[in-house]
Amino acid sequence: MNPLVQISLDLTNIDEAIETSSMALRAGVDWLEAGTPLILAEGLHGVRNLRDSFPNVPIVADLKTMDGGYLEAEMMAKAGATHVVVMARAHPETIKCVVQAGKDFGIKVMGDNMISDNMIDGAKLLEDLGCDYIIHHIGYDERRGISAQGGKMPSPLDQLIEVVKAVDVPVQAVGGLTLEQAIKCPQYGAPLVVLGAPLVIDADSFKTADGDLESSLKKICNAIHSQKVLYNKN
C-alpha cells in the first residue's frame, strides 16, 4: 500500500480535536485517530462528533482493548469508527472477538504488540488471529522508565524491519519517534505513519519562516506521501 498519514488526537477536548482535525485534513492527513486520552475524556460522544464533522474520513479508535472485545468494538463501530485497536497481551479469545466484531460491523482491526514478551511473535500472533494491521509499539512509560534508570531508550525502529518481514499485513510504528524518524517509516516498510497531536514541529527542515503549523504539516504529509514503501509485501 502507499504511505498514509494518521494524526493521533491525544487531546482531552472534542472541540480542540475537531479544530486540529480540520487543520490536519487541509494539510493532507489521511486518517484521524481518536487517541486514548480523547476516548477517556469524551468516549463515544467524541467519536460520534468526529464522524459527524468528517463523514468520509477513516477514524481509528485507540481503545487498547484487553477484555470485552466484541462489545467495545461494536460500540465504537456504531459510533462511527472505522478501525479499532486490540492488544496482543489480551487473551486470544478477546482478540478473536474483536476480529469477529470487525467482520460483523464492517470495520478493520489493528493489533498492538506493546509489551509482548517477543515483539515479532506478538505481531505474528495478531496477524494469525485475524488482525488487519499491526501496530509495533513501544509504550510511553516503558521508554521513560528505562531512560530514567540510565538505559538506552527503546525505539520501535529497533525491530521494525523484522516485524515488517514477519507479517503480511501493513505495519505502523509508534512510540517515541522523532518527527524525522516518523517520516522515514515507509523506508522501513511501515506505510502507516502516525503523527501525534498536539503537534510540535521540531524538525528544522520542516519549519516555516512564519511558524505556520498547517504549512509545516503539509510539507510533512507531502514528504511521506512521496515515498515508496520498502520491504512491504502488500
Image (spheres, rainbow, N blue to C red):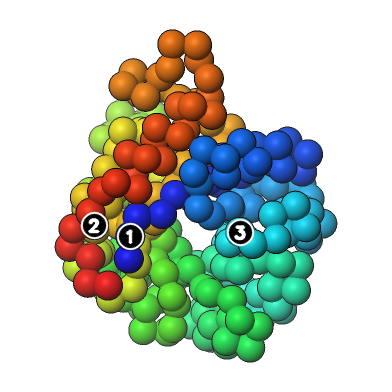
Q: Nearer the viewer, residue 228 or 115?
A: 228
Q: Nearer the viewer, residue 133 or 152?
A: 133
At label 1, counting other C-alpha atoms closer than 10 Å, the crowd grade (few under 14, some 14-19, many 20 or more) is: some
Q: Residue at x 35, y 55 (%)?
A: 3
Figure check: 57 above or below 98: above
The residue indicated by pointer 1 is 2
The residue indicated by pointer 2 is 229
Mark 2 secondary-structure assignment: loop
Q: Earlier in the sequence, mark 3 or mark 1?
A: 1
Q: Nearer the viewer, residue 116 or 225?
A: 225
Give the CA separation, mark 3 to mark 2: 23 Å
Quadrant the C terminus occupies: bottom left
Q: Amino acid at mark 2?
A: Val
Q: Residue at x 39, y 66 (%)?
A: 134
Mark 1 secondary-structure assignment: loop
Q: Which mark is residue 57?
A: 3
Figure check: 208 above or below 29: above
Figure check: 99 above or below 176: below
Q: Residue at x 69, y 47 (%)?
A: 38
Mark 3 secondary-structure assignment: loop
Q: Earlier in the sequence, mark 3 or mark 2?
A: 3
Q: Amino acid at mark 1?
A: Asn
Q: Is residue 75 left or right of residue 20?
A: right
Q: Position of residue 83 (x, y in %)?
A: 57, 68
Give the CA separation, mark 1 to mark 2: 7 Å
Quadrant the N terminus occupies: bottom left
Q: Is residue 2 left or right of residue 73?
A: left
